[in-house]
């Protein structure tokens, strides 16, 4: 079923914002204006924005370090992201997290460095929601590379054992860091592993925003109504390299060409044009507005206040005088 | 009014009282409904299965589950059966747990307690007998607690559960299974972190001993007294924060320092205290600092060998005499 016009347009705008954010990050690195390494999710925008679309504000999101998609999807602003990325005192984490984005107001509890450590935090969050008898749902958004971590199995096991309101969304972008997925997986799909824990799963296209959104809407409803965990695997393709220092040379040009034909933003744009929701002129204005938003956020972040030596030892302990 | 209870009962009472007081407190771990060693025995009768959560054997993941629950409004008390098994959870404990408050800019404190059994003497060999406290002193953001009496076990565990910082409580197997008893008030009490206790005053040497080693130090004190050597025995009770004031006021008085721990020597608790002594209190010292600790060997299972491995009153007596 097609999404409502306003909803689809809103998701499109968010996808544009994600791509503009990453393009800006890339150019700032190239110009030598910042050092913070990047992990771009170019081409995966429909997954990140689609999975977070159906979440409520009180729902919990664990995201990935690949780009800013899911964080923007949950409501994080360009300004907040850049203040933190640049390590400013006025950043969400007071500049102590940088790429580890976290926002308590949006129920985003933070981002781990060692991939997959947070698999179990999602389960613990959902356990807490169930014990408190709320209808809060936790979304654990993860790449297929991380699904080979030791935490994945025990986390899914406990989610199913205790029938917890958690949704696992696997973004299969065909790469695990600098390797094709086939170097890490004996199978084409990750999702059937869920069956071993009795968790229902689905494998869906990750390029079409309406498909990604609707699959997640169903999974979230499943979890919220007390039916336990659910797993969705989204098939997409990482058009960027793993990180800003990636030497590259391992991506097959024919893959880039093939997947490039189904760019999620282009697909959504076509729908908006076909349904008369957006005109070419309107699209141009929208893209300019998004770019201006990002440029403004970056400018503001550059002039934001740096933390000082007093901040170095703040927020380590609640108890005073321990260090 | 006071009553006499065992070390195990002290831990059990602390959890029961805190669960009664605060509905957000719950206990999880492997077999906690039964309580393999008895710390959690019987709690399920009063609090039900929802608040005594038996977990699968997945140490790293159950530590993460407790962290998640702690970030969402609960106060979990996690049992990791042996500290040797806590090493399976080192990613969560050292990479994440202690640093989460900081990296999130104080948005997500993690108020949880980990209880884990330490120590040898039960002939269980290399992987069920270690004292790995010193493995955790490098991790920022953690409070480390090692009680030696039922009074301290109860008061410190209650403080741990109420703390907004993550706290690791090291529970000595010899104290739990050795029938150690002690007096506790009938009334409610808690003990602040970072306050050492002088177990025995003395003038000739300062002996800083942790956990079960406090008892070995007290026995050593009796033996040394027969030779007119009067040692001061200090029980820090918390490893982090460490009550440096009490320790070094004593060292200023005696001029001699011996550290005693059941864990291994290299990079141990004694090494940290000795470094503090050398760096900040060097002029107080009249003799080189002596460390009593286990050797850098795996723990042997054989009774004959394990008894050679473990530090005891004899090694403390020898160390004290080396400072005189």
Image: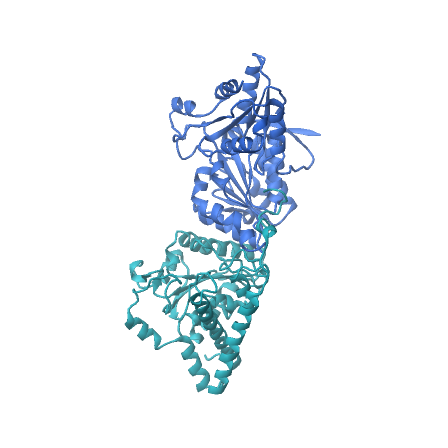
Chain colours: A cyan, B blue
In this orientation, which residue lies closer to the viewer: A160 or B122? B122
User: Residue B89: image x %, image y %?
Assistant: 45, 45
Does the rendering let one see residue B99?
yes
- When the figure is inspected, residue B31 is found, relative to residue A249, above or below; the finding is above
In this orientation, which residue lies closer to the viewer: A75 or A288? A288
Q: Quadrant of residue A306?
A: bottom right
User: Residue A288: image x %, image y %?
Assistant: 50, 79
**Count of numbered tags:** 0
User: Residue A5: image x %, image y %?
Assistant: 51, 82
Q: Residue furthest right?
A: B1
In this orientation, which residue lies closer to the viewer: B321 or B211? B321
Residue for point 44% across, 75% down: A209
Q: Quadrant of residue A255?
A: bottom left
- Quadrant containing the N terminus of chain A is bottom left
Left or right of A26: which side holds B77? right
- Quadrant containing the C terminus of chain A is top right
In this orientation, which residue lies closer to the viewer: A252 or A187? A252
Does the rendering let one see residue A77?
no
Q: Quadrant of residue A76?
A: bottom right
- When the figure is inspected, residue B46 is found, relative to residue B180, above or below; the finding is below
User: Residue A163: image x %, image y %?
Assistant: 48, 57
Left or right of B310: which side holds B112? right
């Amino acid at each position: 079923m097609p999404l409502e016009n306003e909803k689809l347009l809103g998701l499109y705008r968010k996808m544009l914002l994600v791509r503009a954010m990453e393009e800006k990050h890339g150019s700032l690195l190239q110009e030598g204006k910042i050092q913070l390494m990047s992990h771009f999710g170019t081409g995966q925008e429909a997954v990140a924005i689609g999975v977070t679309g159906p979440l409520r504000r009180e729902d919990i999101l664990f995201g990935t370090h690949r780009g800013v998609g899911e964080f923007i999807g949950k409501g994080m602003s360009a300004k907040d992201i850049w203040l933190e990325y640049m390590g400013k005192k006025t950043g969400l984490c007071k500049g102590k997290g940088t790429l580890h984005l976290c926002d308590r107001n949006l129920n985003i509890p933070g981002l781990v460095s060692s991939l997959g450590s947070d698999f179990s935090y999602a389960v613990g969050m959902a356990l807490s929601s169930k014990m408190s008898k709320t209808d809060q749902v936790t979304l654990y958004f993860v790449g297929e590379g991380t699904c080979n971590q030791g935490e994945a199995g025990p986390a899914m096991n406990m989610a199913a054992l205790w029938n917890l309101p958690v949704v696992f969304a696997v973004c299969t972008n065909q790469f695990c860091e600098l390797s094709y997925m086939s170097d890490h997986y004996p199978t084409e799909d990750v999702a059937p592993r869920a069956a071993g824990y009795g968790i229902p799963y689905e494998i869906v296209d990750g390029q079409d925003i309406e498909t990604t959104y609707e699959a997640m809407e169903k999974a979230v409803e499943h979890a919220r109504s007390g039916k336990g965990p659910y797993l969705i695997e989204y098939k997409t393709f990482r058009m960027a390299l793993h990180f800003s220092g990636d030497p590259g040379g391992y991506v097959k040009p024919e893959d880039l060409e093939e997947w490039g034909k189904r760019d999620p933003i282009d697909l959504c744009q076509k729908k908006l044009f076909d349904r008369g929701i957006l005109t070419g002129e309107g699209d141009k204005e929208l893209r300019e507005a998004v770019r201006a938003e990002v440029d403004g956020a970056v400018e503001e972040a550059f002039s934001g206040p740096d933390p000082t030596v007093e901040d170095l030892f703040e927020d380590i302990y609640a108890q005073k005088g321990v260090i | 009014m006071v009553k006499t209870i065992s070390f195990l009962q002290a831990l059990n009472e602390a959890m029961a009282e805190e669960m009664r007081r605060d509905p957000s407190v719950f206990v999880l771990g492997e077999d906690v409904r039964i309580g393999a060693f008895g710390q959690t025995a019987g709690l399920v009768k009063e609090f039900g299965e929802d608040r005594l959560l038996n977990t699968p054997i997945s140490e790293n993941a159950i530590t993460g589950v407790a962290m998640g629950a702690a970030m969402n409004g609960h106060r979990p008390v996690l049992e990791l059966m042996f500290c040797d098994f806590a090493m399976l959870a080192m990613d969560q404990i050292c990479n994440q747990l202690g640093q989460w408050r900081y990296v999130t800019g104080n948005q997500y404190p993690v108020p949880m307690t980990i209880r884990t059994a330490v120590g040898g003497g039960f002939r269980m060999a290399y992987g069920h007998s270690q004292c790995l406290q010193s493995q955790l002193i490098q991790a920022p953001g953690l409070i480390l607690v090692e009680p030696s009496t039922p009074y301290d076990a109860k008061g410190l565990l209650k403080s741990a559960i109420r703390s907004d910082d993550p706290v690791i409580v090291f529970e000595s197997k010899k104290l739990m299974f050795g029938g150690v008893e002690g007096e506790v008030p009938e009334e409610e009490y808690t003990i602040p972190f970072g306050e050492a206790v002088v177990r025995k005053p003395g003038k000739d040497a300062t002996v800083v001993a942790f956990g079960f080693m406090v008892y070995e130090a007290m026995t050593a004190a009796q033996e040394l007294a027969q030779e007119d050597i009067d040692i001061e025995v200090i029980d820090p009770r918390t490893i982090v924060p460490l009550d440096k004031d009490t320790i070094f006021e004593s060292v200023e008085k005696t001029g001699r320092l011996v550290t005693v721990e059941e864990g291994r020597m290299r990079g141990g608790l004694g090494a940290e205290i000795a470094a503090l002594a050398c760096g900040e209190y060097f002029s107080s010292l009249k003799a080189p600092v002596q460390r009593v600790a286990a050797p850098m060997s795996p723990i042997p299972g054989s009774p004959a060998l394990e008894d050679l491995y473990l530090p005891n009153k004899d090694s403390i007596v020898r160390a004290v005499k080396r400072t005189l």
